[in-house]
Image (cartoon, grey):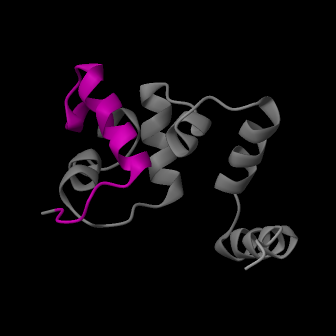
């Protein structure tokens, strides 16, 4: 049973599942995943792979920008999210490190 507060992207995805009028099993199957994929997302603390989340979002017609940012994004932002979603863990870590190094820090 999921005991932690919902993560924003997870809440948005599950709201879309509920709004679709389709069963968890039907969406899981349409995404090419095991029949319990959406149910696990709903009821466990397991962190699904990015690929799993993207497959479910695709079946529901949810954009990556809405899913992860909570709003529609510019074409450039959407492209970045798409590229990042397809990156390896090492590539994601490298991008995060690069962005952190280039972020302005607040004066204390």
Q: Residue at x 46, y 36 (%)?
A: 57
Predominant secondary structure, magenta span: helix
Q: Quadrant of the N terminus?
A: bottom left
Whether residue 59 is situated above or below residue 54 in the rendered picture: above
Return the x and y of residue 11 as percentages of the image width and height. Answer: 33, 44
Q: Residue at x 42, y 27 (%)?
A: 60
Would residue 8 be counted in the magenta stretch? Answer: yes
Would residue 16 be counted in the magenta stretch? Answer: yes
Depth check, front residue: 11 or 87: 11
Q: Residue at x 30, y 39 (%)?
A: 14
Return the x and y of residue 31 as percentages of the image width and height. Answer: 41, 38
Kindly indicate the quadrant of the structure image that contains residue 93.
bottom right
Whether residue 1 is situated above or below residue 6 in the rendered picture: below
Kindly indicate the quadrant of the structure image that contains residue 108.
bottom right
71 sits left or right of 9 in the view: right
Depth check, front residue: 35 or 52: 52
Return the x and y of residue 24 as percentages of the image width and height. Answer: 22, 37
Whether residue 107 is situated above or below residue 62 in the rendered picture: below
Q: Which residues are magenta?
A: 2-27
Depth check, front residue: 66 or 44: 66
Q: Residue furthest right?
A: 102
């Amino acid at each position: 049973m999921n005991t932690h507060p919902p993560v924003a992207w997870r809440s948005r995805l599950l709201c879309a599942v509920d709004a679709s009028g389709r069963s968890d099993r039907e969406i899981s199957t349409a995404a090419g995943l095991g029949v319990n994929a959406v149910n696990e997302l709903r009821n466990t603390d397991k962190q699904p792979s990015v690929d799993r989340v993207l497959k479910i979002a695709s079946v529901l017609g949810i954009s990556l920008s809405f899913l992860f940012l909570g709003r529609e994004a510019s074409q450039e932002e959407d492209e970045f999210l798409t590229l990042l979603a397809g990156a390896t863990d090492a590539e994601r870590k490298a991008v995060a490190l690069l962005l952190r190094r280039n972020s302005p820090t607040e004066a204390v």
